[in-house]
Amino acid sequence: MTRKRIVRAVVREIVVRVEHEQIKMLVHWQGGDHTALSVKKNKIGRHRWSAEPEIGPLIRALARQLPDKAIAALLNRLGKTTGRRNGWTQSRVCTFRNQHDIGVYKHGERTARGEYTLQEAAERLDVSPMTVLRMIRSGSLPAKQYCKGTPWVIRREDIERPETQTYANRHATPVIRSARSTGRAFSMK
């Protein structure tokens, strides 16, 4: 109450205009002075607690590849924060997806689309993940990555190409498998 009385004692009126992307204010003080102020207008749907603009497309791309818990871990590794500058959790990713109408990841959806991760492509080609990464870097295996740190997406057609198979066979390094994955102690190619 006291603050309002102080403001009323020193401010005669405030004139506000909206011009394009700016809010222009003119403060008329009781003594006859004037002060012009200008503030950038928020965009539609944006406020001080909004997440960074690139978070939406990033979560949309990752939701096609990973469950919410894995998305949260990846966003935290990338140093991305929520609109309130908190770290990401599974429930925060879920809430963000629901607010922005982003579908939930379904187990097996990526494989049904014919897309594989680096590890899955290595298993299909019977080589190490590092060999697959070298193939991607050399351009012999086309792959996409939304941004650095996100999973590689490799299409089934690209893995099954004869050139890819030949390159994998030529440059393969021996793969030691665990007893769980093969049923044997280890195997070498």
Image (cartoon, helix red, strand yellow):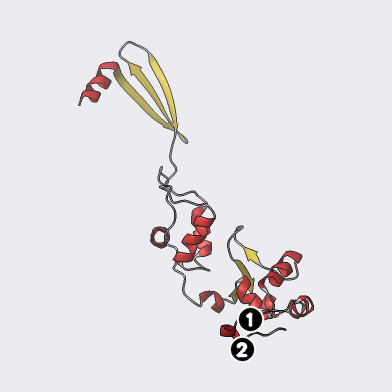
Point out which mark residue 184 bears.
Answer: 2
**Residue 177, numbered label:** 1
Q: Quadrant of the C terminus?
A: bottom right
78 left or right of 82 in image: right
How many marks the image carries: the answer is 2
Nearer-the-camera pick, 18 or 115: 115
Q: Residue furthest right?
A: 170
Residue reaching furthest bottom?
183
Whichever of labels 1 and 2 marks the residue nearer the N terminus, that label is: 1
- Amino acid bearing label 2: Arg
Rounded to the nearest angstrom, the CA distance separating label 1 from label 2 is 8 Å
Left or right, 170 with respect to 90, comes to right
Dot 1 falls on a residue whose secondary structure is: loop
The amino acid sitting under disc 1 is Arg
As drawn, 177 above or below 15: below
State whether residue 35 is above or below residue 98: above
The one of 189 and 27 positioned closer to us in this rendering: 189
Q: Quadrant of the N terminus?
A: top left
Q: Is any atom of residue 42 visible in this view?
A: yes
Which residue is at 59% across, 77% downward?
114
Residue 57 makes an appearance in the image: no
